[in-house]
Image: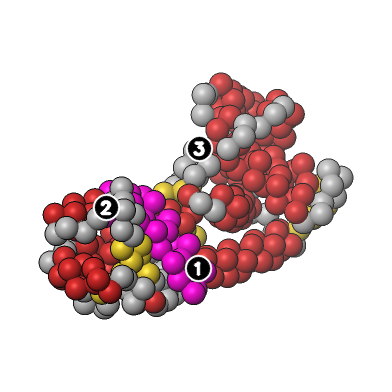
Amino acid sequence: MSSVSGVSSYTSALYQWQNQKLSTSTSGGSSSSSSSSSSSSLSQLLGGNSVSSQLSSMVELTKYAMDAMGLDSNSRVTFNQITKYREQLNTEFNTAVKDGLSKLGVSDPSSVTFTLAADGSMTATSANATDQANVQAWLKGNAAIGKDLRTALTSAGISGSTAVSMTVDSNGKLIAASSTDSADKAAIQAVLDNSKLGSTLNTGMKSLAVSSDAKFTLKANENGSVTVESSDAATKAAVQKFFDNNPALVKKFGQIQALSGLDDARKSLQVSPSDLRKRIEVESMAAWWAGSGSTSNSFGNYSNGSLSMLSGLNLSV
């Protein structure tokens, strides 16, 4: 996540929000005491090493959202407008995640043909381009799985230069493809019958799929990535890889999280949802909230195809 440039430009506004917060939470104290407390608290905030990362994660995303809403530096906005935009982002996020996860699996594993090369590497072909791409990507990460089969074929007298093609059924049984040379087909099938590779391929293809009712949580990290947690290890691995490969969705999640935190700040300061605020005031409020000590870890809970934000929970799934 990029750091915020010109953090000092928010200093006076931060004092304003800090004073306002103190004035709503302190009673009976003198104004000088409140002012001194505000100054001390803010000095600690601005002097800490964490301020730049806090501001970069919330203010920059808030600024990005303001830009996306078409608001210039002099624009005024209500929190109702911001909430509506956050709901729009949430809908877009849910649709993209649902569509993306639905394409991770292999729709018809039995129609995928595997070809074993002389060096034990394997390639996948399928009439379904998405299936082919998903399986080939999995094979790339498991490059050595065909070496034992190639060794067994060589021991059975099958030339290393012979390319062997096969499919795998739902039980993990390898079947020599119809294109296999008839002179070697019986010997090849005998080796395939004794191979555990079919079970490995079947398990691998199943691991690519993410159930439509999958449940997982997302936690934003300081480096701009997200961490996925799920009670199902296969779901966790598949969804983590999905978000690692989709930085635009990770950024959208960050925006949703930042705007959710901004609404928490609004409630803390008792600002009406319909009150007009200048854009700079909104961004300053985000800065104040990010460093106020009132924030808590925020998690995204994805269930039944929908994201909801959970604040203040130390989740361990």
> Residue 223: which disc?
3
Instruction: Name the amino acid, label 2.
Output: Gly
Whole-Å distance between the Cαs marked 2 and 1? 30 Å
> Which residue in the structure is indicated by mark 2?
160
Closer-to-camera residue (157/286): 157
On the image, the x and y values in percent for residue 122 come to: 35, 56
User: Left or right: 44 with respect to 286?
Assistant: left
Q: Nearer the viewer, mark 3 or mark 2?
A: 2
> Which residue in the structure is indicated by mark 1?
130
**How many other residues sit within 10 Å of disc 2, few (<14), some (14-19) or many (≥20)?**
some
Whole-Å distance between the Cαs marked 3 and 2? 48 Å
Closer-to-camera residue (167/21): 167
User: Left or right: 166 with respect to 127?
Assistant: left
**How many other residues sit within 10 Å of disc 3, few (<14), some (14-19) or many (≥20)?**
few
The residue positioned 77% from the left and 42% from the top of the image is 280
On the image, the x and y values in percent for residue 94 come to: 55, 68
Q: Nearer the viewer, mark 1 or mark 3?
A: 1
